[in-house]
Image: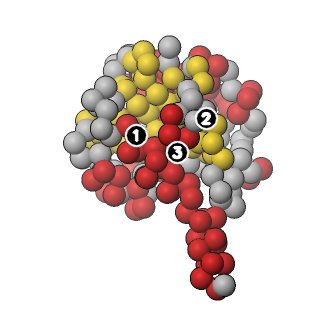
Amino acid sequence: MAIKILTNLMHKVLDDRYILREVIFPYFIPKNEFSRILFVGCKWYTRNYNTQFQQKDYWTLDVDQRQRKHGAKQHITDTLENIDQHFAENSLDLIVCNGVFGWGLDEREDVEKAFRKCYQCLRAEGVFILGWNDIAKRRPFPLEECQALNLFDKYKFPPLSTSEYLTKTFNRHKYYFYVKR
Ligand SMILES: C[S@@+](CC[C@H](N)C(=O)[O-])C[C@H]1O[C@@H](n2cnc3c(N)ncnc32)[C@H](O)[C@@H]1O
C-alpha cells in the first residue's frame, strides 16, 4: 500500500519529465530530418539531455549565464526573444521550449516576440514544442490569446495522438505541439 502511494506521488511530480525524456525525445532522435535542435532553458536536471542528443546538432539557450555549465557544447546565453540573432530563418528542425513560459518569459510582448521568432527560425515542417504549467501562478496570460502561436498549425504528436497533452502532475504541466506549414 505504502509503495503504491509513493509511486503515485512520484508520478505526480515526475510524469512531465518522463513524457519529455521517454516519449518526446525518443520520437525525434532517430529521425534524420530532425537534426538541428534547440532546447530552451537549462538546469542541472536538463544536463543529461546533452547526452541523449549527442548525435544531433544540439543547441541550448538560456538567458541566465549561470546555466551555461548545464547546457550543450553549443550553448547560447541570451533571451529567446533574440533567437534570430543566433539562428538564420528556416534553419532549425525542432525547438523545445519547456518550462520557460511562466518561468521568466512572462511579459506578453516578450512572449509574442519570442514565439514569432521561433516560427521564423524553424524550417517548413519544423516542430515547436511548448511545455508549460496550466496553473494561475505559472500562467502569465491565457495561451489562447497568444497571436504568435496562431502562425503555427497544431501538430498531432503521433506517440500521444494529440497536439495538447496534460501530464499527470500536480502543477498541470502540459505539452503543446505545433508545426510550421
Ligand atoms: C524552470 S527553468 C528550466 C526549464 C527547463 N527547460 C526545463 O525543462 O525544466 C526556466 C529557465 O528558463 C530561463 N529563461 C527564463 N526566461 C527566459 C527567456 N526569455 N529566454 C531564455 N531563457 C529564459 C531561466 O533562466 C531558467 O533557467
The quarter of the displayed image where residue 149 is located:
top right
Residue 125 x/y as whole percent: 44, 19
Where residue 27 is drawn, which disc sits there?
Answer: 1
Where residue 98 is drawn, which disc sits there?
Answer: 3
The numbered mark, 3 or 2, whose residue comes first in the sequence reads 3
How packed mark 3 is, by other alpha carbons closer than 10 Å (few <14, some 14-19, many 20 or more), is: many
* Mark pair 3, 2: CA separation: 17 Å
- The residue depicted at 71 percent of the width and 47 percent of the height is 134
Where 178 falls versus 53 (above or below)?
A: above
Q: Nearer the viewer, mark 3 or mark 2?
A: 2
User: Please, what is the three-letter code of the amino acid marked with disc 1?
Assistant: Tyr
Q: Is residue 67 left or right of residue 174?
A: left
* Mark pair 1, 2: CA separation: 14 Å
In the picture of the structure, the residue carrying the numbered disc 2 is 162
Q: Nearer the viewer, residue 88 or 22?
A: 22
User: Please, what is the three-letter code of the amino acid marked with disc 2?
Assistant: Thr
Q: Nearer the viewer, mark 3 or mark 1?
A: 1
The numbered mark, 3 or 1, whose residue comes first in the sequence reads 1
